[in-house]
Image (tube, helix red, strand yellow):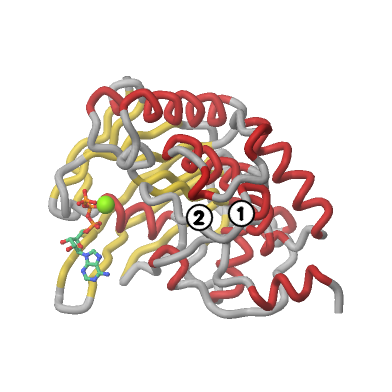
Amino acid sequence: MNGEHEQIAERPDHDGLTGAAAALSPPSVVPPTRQPAADPPRPGAEPDVALALSEVSKEYPGGILALRAVSVEVRIGEQVAVVGPSGSGKTTLLTVLGTLERPTSGSVVVAGRDVVGLTDGELAGLRAHEIGFVFQGFHLQESMTALDNVANGMLYTGSPARERRRAARAALERVGLAHRVTHRPTELSGGERQRVAIARAIAKRPLIILADEPTGNLDSTSGREVIALLHELAAEGATLTLITHDAAISERFPRHIQMRDGEVVGDERA
Ligand SMILES: Nc1ncnc2c1ncn2[C@@H]1O[C@H](COP(=O)(O)OP(=O)(O)OP(=O)(O)O)[C@@H](O)[C@H]1O
Ligand SMILES: [Mg+2]
């Protein structure tokens, strides 16, 4: 057994994520191989649609309707800000779009695939290749270097360890952290930690980046830098959907989805 397998067996979760975001990922030992690209597009699906929800509702235990018949479509390369009051369903929307939560009803298409009928393992494979997540709380492993955090986030792509480390190094360079690859999160500033998390999200070159208040824990300067970086990365070909409470951030997005009480109440393109 080589080191890579030991690392997979020890890994704390899927997608290199910790905490609640990883909680819904199923346990599995064998990384799924890339599947989305091999699949033909869903019949009738628009070829340039990155994400589509149709009449999606999400009810949490206790009868909380966090999403009420939400229909929304995000095209490849779009940059979308999701705004709305606390409790309006923004994070729920993002976790359903990112397949971390299953909807109670309705259909979800991610990267051309109807995901509702997929198994947990298939969803993990889809996320591993097509979706990069960035969260307010970074979700980094404190005991690991920046390089290992990023490389670990690619475990489920099925790439060999050497390729993961190469991609991780390139991603850290891309976010301006070539000089911090051996630092652990506690040895990094908040802005640098979030850039490590962004490097983890982009190292696998995903079609879709989903970010939930990525500047929420940052000072305004670091926050601006992080947002500028996300805009740049999206301009290089990814699709960005980002939740923010900050009007100064949302106004720089060409499209705004406004949520209230679990519904999309506004969807404007500049
Ligand atoms: N796991 C859960 N179980 C039960 N209810 C939940 C769960 N997660 C969220 N909710 C409820 O669903 C609703 C929507 O929550 P959500 O986290 O999507 O809101 P949000 O718009 O992201 O809010 P915030 O801006 O405060 O982050 C809220 O009423 C919340 O209390
Ligand atoms: Mg939220």
- Rendered position, 126 above or below 25: above
- Circles 1 and 2, Cβ within 8 Å, touching? The answer is yes
- Rendered position, 244 above or below 112: above
Query: Is ligand 2 within 8 Å of the beta carbon of the residue shown at mark 2?
Result: no
Residue type marked 2: Leu
Helix, strand or loop at mark 2: loop
Instruction: Please give the name of the residue rendered at 38% of the width and 58% of the height, measured from the top-left corner.
Output: 95
Helix, strand or loop at mark 1: helix
Q: Residue furthest front?
A: 187
Instruction: Please give the name of the residue rendered at 51% of the width and 64% of the height, measured from the top-left corner.
Output: 115
Q: Residues within 10 Å of mark 1 (few under 14, many from 20)?
A: many
Is residue 10 found left or right of 100 in the rendered image? right
Q: Position of residue 36 (x, y in %)?
A: 66, 57
Q: Which residue is mark 2?
A: 140
Q: Position of residue 122 (x, y in %)?
A: 61, 70
Question: Dividing the picture into quarters, in which one does residue 84 lie?
Answer: top left
Q: Which residue is mark 1?
A: 149
Q: Position of residue 170 (x, y in %)?
A: 72, 37
**What's the CA distance linking mark 1 and mark 2?**
7 Å
